[in-house]
Image: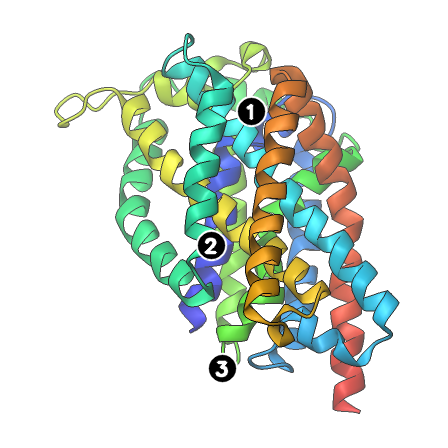
Amino acid sequence: MNRYFFYLIATNMLVNVIVWVPKILLAERFDGAVMAIPIGVLIGTIFLFLFVPAINKFPNLGIPEILEQTPGLFRFSFLFLFSVMWFLAGVITLLSFVDHLVEFVNPEMPSLALVILFLFLVIIVLRYSDASKLLYALEILLVLNVPLILIIMYQAYTNEYLTMDSIFEVGTHLFEIPSWSAISSVTYIFSGYANMVIFNRVFNKKISMKLLAVIPFVAIGNLLTSFFIPIGLWGADGVGELAYPWTSTADTLSIEYGPVERVITVFILLYVSITTMSILIHWYVALEMIKSMFNIKRAGKIKKFVTNWAALLSFGIASIILETMTTNKSIGQLSEIWLDIRFPFEAVLVVFMFFLARRKKA
């Protein structure tokens, strides 16, 4: 089961190339973003190496089961707050990507209709899926998509218009003090591991600690690529004008003898599937937390049916309301605020799991 753990982290890394992290870092490229990368990687690595040994102490158990011995009010509050955080992760991803599709595929396309279409797909899949099925689907998705993503990265690195001078210019700002937002966005690259609070239910073996050493290096490669490639192609100043840095960057690339010449076409198709999978994972975690708040496992069929559909419909209604209330600019602001709040929430989760594991050992 070790590989599924790494799939969760890989999905989080891939989806952030298009949704949040590059936009925030590129906006602060002269004001601490470069320093934020090593600081954020260090913090993310510490969180990872604290969380994984802790969750290894509870095979086949998710956070709802681990918290069963705690006071009822504490357990309910904990699960409620973190279910909201996971729901927001999914809905912000959904709104951001729909905004990308409208901008680059068809500006006349009604974004609300597209959101409703995605919601219908996600809700139906969530209603009839479990953790194992989602992980199997994630494996198939990554096996099919990652080779194509690597081809796109190769095209970006070998592009004749990639200007190293622009990259070096931004690199000279290494010692600028980073902002909270920049560090928060970098640490989110690692946050796929946090989905184990629910997916650990289907892990009957411990996650190998030896393999964890690879993750920080992959994260650094992901961050440097998503940050510096747009700078190299658009210039240190020009990149700041882009509303969608990596989607615009993909639009500049082409594969001369490929079956599809414009990279943007492949890029959009790849990230439709990856983004949808990311939403499914986040909302599955949120849904399972909500169900655990009401002890759904011990409930009758009617209560299970009502709770499931009530939670899923609530996700859909809240998403539609947010879509009608937000613009491209406000979605970006909401994403940044959520990342800033998520950082301390994740720290609390990691520390809490660490102490629970130590208490069990004692």
- Pick whichever of labels 2 and 1 is earlier in the sequence: 2
Name the colour scheme.
Answer: rainbow
Q: Position of residue 74 (x, y in %)?
A: 86, 66
Query: Mark 1 — residue?
Result: 168
The answer to whether residue 242 is visible is yes
Pick whichever, 320 or 145, lies toward us: 320
**Residue shown at 65% from the left, 24% from the top:** 332
Q: Does 319 sit left or right of 108 as displayed?
A: right
Query: Mark 2 — residue?
Result: 127
Q: Position of residue 227 (x, y in %)?
A: 54, 30
Query: Mark 3 — residue?
Result: 204
Q: Residues within 10 Å of mark 2 (few under 14, many from 20)?
A: some
The secondary element bearing badge 1 is classed as helix
Which dot, 2 or 1, sits closer to the camera?
2
Q: Position of residue 317 (x, y in %)?
A: 61, 34
Which dot, 1 or 3, sits closer to the camera?
3
- Identity of the amino acid at label 2? Arg
Q: Position of residue 10 (x, y in %)?
A: 46, 52
